[in-house]
Amino acid sequence: MSQDIVADALNMIKNAKKARKDTVRTDKMSNLLIEILKIMKQKNAIKKYKINSKEKQIEITIGEIFDCKAIKPRFSVNKKNIDKYIRRYLPARNVGTIIISTNKGLMTHQEVIEEETGGSLIAYFY
């Protein structure tokens, strides 16, 4: 396991989905990962997640997801060039979500376009 908690957790979710598992348990957690899981739950990519703060674990129940990955390096985007990254990381228009870290917190790429702001690319899933 590497030092990137988000990349490790998303990789575990993707591998568990390929292995036809329903749940996956991560051994590390962070506030950034929890915020990403909230967005993924809103978009039905995961069904639920349970945080065990004593053992610092998160148990994730996988939902409707095909692929998820952390974006490295974390490119900076603004409202003008976000379309380039949508074409690069997502399979088609209106399919999938890119998570972007802004000064207002984590947002999906649709919210960033509506608010006409920018930020740093964190992850994507579809």
Image (cartoon, rainbow, N blue to C red):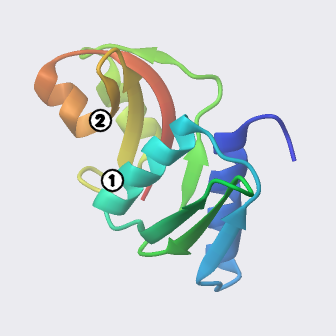
Residue 7 rendering spot, x and y as whole percentages: 68, 43
Residue 17 falls left or right of residue 93: right
Q: Residues within 10 Å of mark 1 (few under 14, many from 20)?
A: few
Q: Residue at x 16, y 17 (%)?
A: 116
Residue 22 rendering spot, x and y as whole percentages: 58, 84
Secondary element at tag 1: loop
Secondary element at tag 2: helix
Residue 40 sits above or below residue 100 on the image: below
* Mark 1, residue position: 92
Point out the residue furthest to the left here: 114
Point out the residue furthest to the front here: 54
Q: Which mark is residue 2?
A: none
Residue 61 rendering spot, x and y as whole percentages: 52, 75
Q: Residue at x 23, y 27 (%)?
A: 112
**Residue type indicated by callout 1:** Ala
- Number of callouts: 2
On the question of residue 91 being in view, the answer is no
Q: Residue at x 25, y 14 (%)?
A: 80
Residue 47 falls left or right of residue 20: left
How far apart are labels 2 and 1 at the CA level?
14 Å
- Camera-nearest label, 2 or 1: 2
Q: Which mark is residue 109?
A: 2
Residue 24 falls left or right of residue 87: right
Ranked by sequence position, the earlier of labels 2 and 1 is: 1
Image quadrant occupied by the C terminus: bottom left
Question: Marks 1 and 2: in contact by CB < 8 Å?
Answer: no
**Residue type indicated by callout 2:** His
On the question of residue 57 being in view, the answer is yes
Residue 96 sits above or below residue 80 on the image: below
Residue 41 rendering spot, x and y as whole percentages: 37, 61
Instruction: Please tell me which residue lies in front, 81 or 67.
Output: 67
Point out the residue furthest to the right here: 1
